[in-house]
Image (cartoon, helix red, strand yellow):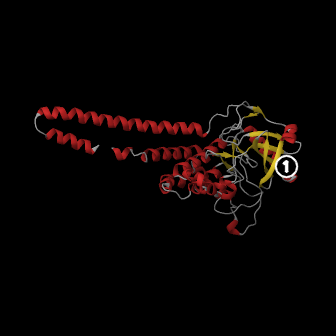
Amino acid sequence: MRTFLNMLTMAGRRGSGGSVSCVLPAVMLCLAALLLSATLLYLHIDAVYQVNEQLLFPPVGCLPGHFKMTTMKNCSAWIQCPHIQEDVRRLKLIGQGTVKKVYLAEWRGHKVALSKLASLDYLEDFLHGLSMLQALQSPYVVRVVGFCLEDHSLVTEYHPHGSLLNLEDVLDQEQFQQQNTWSVRLRLAIDYVSILHYLHNSPAGRRVMCDSNSLEKTLSQFLLTNDFHLLVNDLDALPEVNPSTGLLVKCGHRELTGDFVAPEQLWPFRDTGKPFSDHLMPEYNEKTDIWKIPDVSRFVMGRVPGGDLVHFHLFEVHEECKKEDPQLRPSALQVLNVYRSVYSSMVRDGSGVRDML
């Protein structure tokens, strides 16, 4: 812009009025063209971001009790016990937790994940997770393919990258190194906060991610899709809180420790030597999830060019997330709005438009 103004000034100082009249229209035309190009580019960036937002969680498009995997053309009803027992073929064990064993399996030529109850001691957790998956089916949650209560089986869509724990290993692979950018990683962080916002405002009530007492355990709850987005996968510990009725939760019946869990999840009398008592342990709400956002985001961002700038822009909201008083922490939506704003502004700043001006 300054260059054009200098040209305009120089043009005004040259020779006769006739030469000025020839130069001025050309300069003004170039200036107008540049401003128009800049405006169009800004609009294009915003449009791309809005499209990406829509692609991030496109509509499921199936009726309740139906599913459509990415490898399918049409929706199908959830498969039930006879089809699971006859048509779902186990291939190999790919994961095991306290509640479930997870197998890579095949159903009618489609790769699926088959989860089996690991122990009857955790039947209640298994059934709770299944009920949550059914109630919360949306683009934020892994797709249910079917289930069988007779043999405690659950079939969901398979995602070969596995959980968010595998992010660095996946991005280290040569075919995915082009995805190892601040923008892809920040979009993953946006996915994570979007999922929290959905769970805190879900059709099944305000839900708290209780199976998140360490960074590793939290990361294992999310699946990394082929197009580098996140889905929440494990909902076995998702109790409800209700501000209007005063309903609060406790994540388990054992003492929680460490910096990752929120302060209100720690035994308040630990410094006095008083032994832990579940009966005396205070309850809490969904703001425990907000406390954990900065730690998860730091893992997701990793070490990439531009990552330090992302952390700089998110510093203030992360400070708010780490408020000792949970009432002073922002909501997931407030955090999400900041994340989206940072993404949008960094895309614009990196577009080269400002250098042109």
- Left or right of residue 45, residue 190 in this image: right
Question: Local crowd at mark 1 within 10 Å, few (<14), some, or many (≥20)?
Answer: some
> What x and y, as percent, mark residue 169?
63, 57
Tell me what residue is drawn at x 71 percent, y 55 percent.
Answer: 282
Q: Quadrant of the N terminus?
A: top left
Instruction: Examine the rendering and report whether any part of residue 285 can be seen.
Output: no
- Total count of labels: 1
> What x and y, as percent, mark residue 166?
66, 55
Q: Quadrant of the C terminus?
A: top left
Instruction: Examine the rendering and report whether any part of residue 19 can be seen.
Output: yes
Q: Name the kind of residue labelled 1 in the image.
A: Leu
Tell me what residue is drawn at x 75 percent, y 58 percent.
Answer: 280
Position of residue 294 relative to residue 87, above or below, is below
Residue extending furthest toward the left: 16
Reading the image, the residue beneath label 1 is: 123
> What x and y, as percent, mark residue 292?
62, 54
Between residue 276 and residue 183, name the one nearer to us: 183
Position of residue 283 relative to residue 141, above or below, is below
Q: For the residue labelled by badge 1, is the local secondary structure a helix, a strand or a loop? A: helix
Between residue 68 and residue 301, name the one nearer to us: 68
> What x and y, as percent, mark residue 126?
81, 47
- Left or right of residue 13, residue 328 in this image: right
Tell me where residue 244 sits by quadrant. Answer: top right
Between residue 321 and residue 90, name the one nearer to us: 90
Between residue 130 and residue 246, name the one nearer to us: 130
